[in-house]
Amino acid sequence: MTTIGILDGYVDEPTCLGVPPYISTYPRYIAGAAWNVDRNNNVIYYTVDQIRRDRSLLLKLGKTDILIVIAGMIVPGRYLSGYPISLNEIRLFLTDLDKPIKLLCGPAARYGFGIAGGTKPKEASKIQNIFNGIIKGDCEIIIYELLDRNLDLEDIDLSKKRQNAHSIREYTIEGSRIIKQHPFYPSALIAEIETYRGCPRTITGGCSFCVETLYGKTDFRPIEDIHAEIEALYKNGIKHIRIGNQPCIFSYMSKEAGRKEFPKPNPDAIYKLFKGIHEVAPNLKTIHIDNANPGVIARYPEESREIARIIIRYHTPGDTAAFGIESVDPKVIEENNLKASAEQIIEAIKILNEEGRMRGVNGMLELLPGINFLFGLKGETRETYSLNYKFLEEILHRNLLIRRINIRQVIPLPNTLMYNIGTNIIRKHHVLFKKFKKMVRENIEQPILKKMLPIGVILRDIYTEKTIGKTTFGRQIGSYPLLVGIPGLYPINRFLDIMVVDYGYHSITGIPIPLKINHIPRETLEAIPGIGRKRANRILLQRPFHSEKEFIEALDNIDIAKSILEYISFKQ
């Protein structure tokens, strides 16, 4: 029996997310490879946040035979429940661990350590002396070979990749039980599911900044393989999944992939995929998607509408199809080989609004687009910012909804066209970028948020994650969940239903429902519409209340008292 340690430093890639509450494919595939060699192998899994909280866990990792570090943020993101491991932390945590064979894998091994948007990644060679090997290929393939060769690392090609998508089937099934070692298991953990890798647009070179084309043409995982993996995850207790590990879910199993840059969607395959997920995992609490190509949706509206309806039939509400539009400036689109024109993007947004704008059982709208802007690309000028802003104004004017707007700066990655250009354009337009973000937050995002979630809407199952000051922050479990600030201190790692009472720029303020009027803190009382500080004081002085009559009499305004009675609980 061999002991394998996995230190999950988290990944954030164009098509894969592994920052909590997500668990990426990497630890699951690696564990699956280890158990495929010998089911008695001992696999120990820790997240970097567990190590940050308890350094004694390093002693356990130090006793393993192999220690694999998963790392790499190559898409700039905002995180709430954890953040990716840094170069300095790798030095701090691993330098003194002498016993295990130490291996680095993930995007950090292939492209370097992303620090932030607008900054070139730090090369993994800076910490090469800490590791016995830097895996630039597929981690699970290397781990299988290493274990199969009795830990003899010599002559193993660390750049070796899997033969095809089907070849990892058994790893995905065997590795499903590693989820039980994740600190978010079982209530709040989301498993990222891969449907394929490689981009249909590889045949024209793909986007100038993206590494997905480096995988080559699309390699679809068979539907039955995906079902088998999800069934195994479900049997091991997973409650939430995201079909997010692909460049475009609408292009999955397209018969034209590899021949056309924008392949015609295959609704039959999408139907079999999602229907089968329900059959093998009937009581999942979350089924969401991620990336979608607006160029595909606009070119094939009927097929795309059919796919949207299939997704809505089998998913859970609050779903987001992320459109990587990057820019609507025609010059930037041309010079970076982007996916779609402004007109095509508007059409794709319109299609998803028409199909997915209804409110679902958890309070969120069923399925909306999200859009990603990326600045610092080749051909960008001052006019780029103006065109992008006018585009967003047009969305508002047409009364279209967008679930969220990501505004980021490019990370120039090795082996992409943007790498040689680097950060010159970013530095030149730094002030414009800051101004654009501020204008979008204030003039675009908040008005859309108010349309999407009017005051009084009830959102179900908000998972509380952290407290800052006297505010508790939480989100629904899912893809791009909306941040909710709850005035007052509430236990973390719990689920609450909330009512919308106010707005940030891309977050909301909510109060717990039902309102336990005899127990809720002052901050919550003051946030109730119509209450404020003085009436909150009156409630605090006169509670506990035993009946509606007592509560109405305690306030100086009968109408306000009656307006919130339906949300109040008088339980002691």
Image (tube, rainbow, N blue to C red):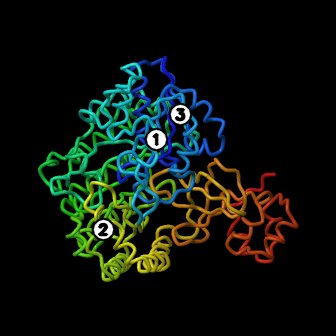
Residue at (61% x, 66% y) in the render: 509
Residue 89 falls left or right of residue 515:
left
Residue that numbered label 3 is attached to: 45
State which tag comes first along the sequence, 2 or 1: 1
Q: What element carries label 3?
A: strand
Residue 99, quarter of the rendered image: top right
Tag 2's secondary structure?
helix
Q: Which of marks 2 and 1 is in front?
A: 1
Kindly identify the amino acid type of the residue bearing the numbered disc 3.
Tyr
Image coords of residue 192 (percent x, y): 42, 44
Residue 402: percent from the left, percent from the top?
40, 67
- Under mark 1, the amino acid is Asn
Q: Is mark 1 on a helix, strand or loop?
A: helix
Instruction: Report the side of 111 relative to 448 (left or right).
Output: left
Q: Which mark is residue 129?
A: 1
- Quarter of the rendering containing residue 557: bottom right
Residue 479 drawn at (x, y percent)? 45, 53
Observer-nearest of 20 and 415: 415
Q: Upstream in the sequence, badge 2 or badge 3?
A: 3
Q: Work out whether 423 lies above or below 152.
A: below
